[in-house]
Structures are given as structure tokens and as C-alpha cells.
Amino acid sequence: MIQEVIVTTTNEDGSTHIAPMGIKKESELIIIAPFKPSATLENIQRNKSAVINRVDDVRVFAGCLTGHKDWPLLPTEKIKDHRLEVALSHLELGLERFEDDELRPRFYCKQLIEINHKPFQGFSRAQSAVLEAAILVSRLHMLTREKIDQEVEYLAIAIDKTAGKNEKVAWEWLMERIKQYRQVSTQEKTV
């Protein structure tokens, strides 16, 4: 099973990198498999640590893909890093082993501590739709225009029926990103 989370890592300059990512658990280890190249990959290789943030504010997922990345942070407990203030819970991880790959290397990490901050109330259909749309936006370069339109049309039903303020904001960011992608694609085809 893949869990959609936000991974925070520390950049070389000490700032925090925030990235949405799907993670897996295998035995007692958590697997993080970022694409090459990526800041998450470089940061975990250098620091041998990462933070898993479990969030229900889907604006964070959408924001990471659309340039809205200024989320309040708090220091972590066991490792020198930061977690998202909006995290419902967070896990601090230490690197156990690394498996290289041309496309997606795998970090096998040991959980050092898990802290719960707020109870999880469950996802609404709109929150789930935003998560799916965020994944769609991360793969725009791999999908046809028709597939994108089809997915957006279906996901919009949940937004229209169940979205609150945060979900509407996140949806708008993602739809704007799709629009920008299409404008750039159209311009590149005409050049």
C-alpha cells in the first residue's frame, strides 16, 4: 500500500524542502523513492534523515506542485530537521540503507519517533479529489490532453458537491497549473 504524505528534508543551505510523495512500509522500514533528479533525493543522501508529515490540509499537496510552498514549520524532536505545523502527525526517520536506480532510487528508513498532534477526522470526497488531481498535475507531461480532461471532469464532481474553502483553493491552484502547462505546450508546438 502506498500512502500519500508530505516529506520534509533539509537543503544544503539549511532551508527546508517540502515535497508530496507516496511512501511504502516494508517490514519495519519505510521506503521513500524519489525520482532522479530531486532535492529530496540529494537531501536524504547527504543528511541520512527525513520527516514524514501526515496532513489533511490538501492545500499543502496542491501548493507543492503549484509554487505555493510557504508553510509554517516547527523543529523536530530527534533529528535536525523540521516538520509542517499543520501535520496531524509526523515520523522522524533515519536512513538504514540505499538502493540506487536510474529512475527512482529507494531509501529504506527506520522510524526513530512518531508523534501525533491532532486526530485525523477522515477525508472528504473533495479532499480525495484534490489528492488525485495533484498526482495528475505531477504527471501532466506523461498524459494526453483527453486523459487530463476526462480525469478533471470526473474529479470536479466531488469538488462541486463536497469542497470546503481549503479544497476550493487547492483545486483552483491545480486547475491554474494545468492551464499554464497547456499554454506552454501550445506555444512549444507552434514554434
Image (tube, grey):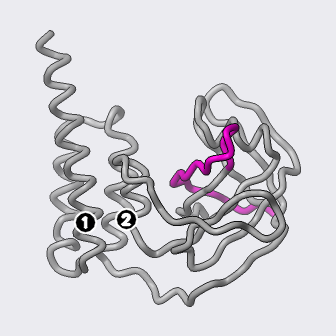
Residue occupying the far left of the picture = 190
In the rendered image, residue 104, in percent from the top left (x then y), is placed at: 63, 36
Q: Which residue corresponds to the image point at 73% horizontal and 67% vertical from the top-left?
A: 76
Q: Mark 2 points at which residue?
A: 59
Q: Which of 73 and 63 is in front in this view?
A: 73
Q: Is the magenta stretch mostly helix, strand or loop?
A: strand
Quadrant containing the N terminus in the rendered view: bottom right
Q: What residue type is labelled 2?
A: Arg
In the image, 186: left or right of 126? Answer: left
Q: Which amino acid does label 1 sit on?
A: Val
Mark linked to residue 169: 1
In the rendered structure, are the residues bearing label 2 and label 1 in contact, judged by CB atoms less than 8 Å apart? yes
Q: Which residue corresponds to the image point at 57% horizontal and 71% vertical from the top-left?
A: 54
Q: Which residue corresponds to the image point at 76% horizontal and 65% vertical from the top-left?
A: 92
In the rendered view, tell whether residue 12 sits above or below residue 133: above
In the rendered image, residue 37, in percent from the top left (x then y), is placed at: 59, 29
In the image, 48: left or right of 25? Answer: right
User: To which quarter of the image does residue 35 belong?
Assistant: top right
Name the N-terminal-most of marks 2 and 1.
2
Decide whether residue 39 is among the magenta residues: no
Q: Which residue corresponds to the image point at 72% horizontal and 55% vertical from the top-left?
A: 50
Mark linked to residue 139: none
Q: What stretch is highlighted in magenta?
A: 10-28
Specify few, some or many for label 2: CA neighbours under 10 Å numbering under 14, 14-19, or 20 or more.
many
Q: Can residue 28 be seen in this view?
A: no
Q: Secondary structure under badge 2?
A: helix
Quadrant containing the C terminus in the rendered view: top left
Decide whether residue 17 is among the magenta residues: yes
User: To which quarter of the image does residue 159 belong?
Assistant: bottom left
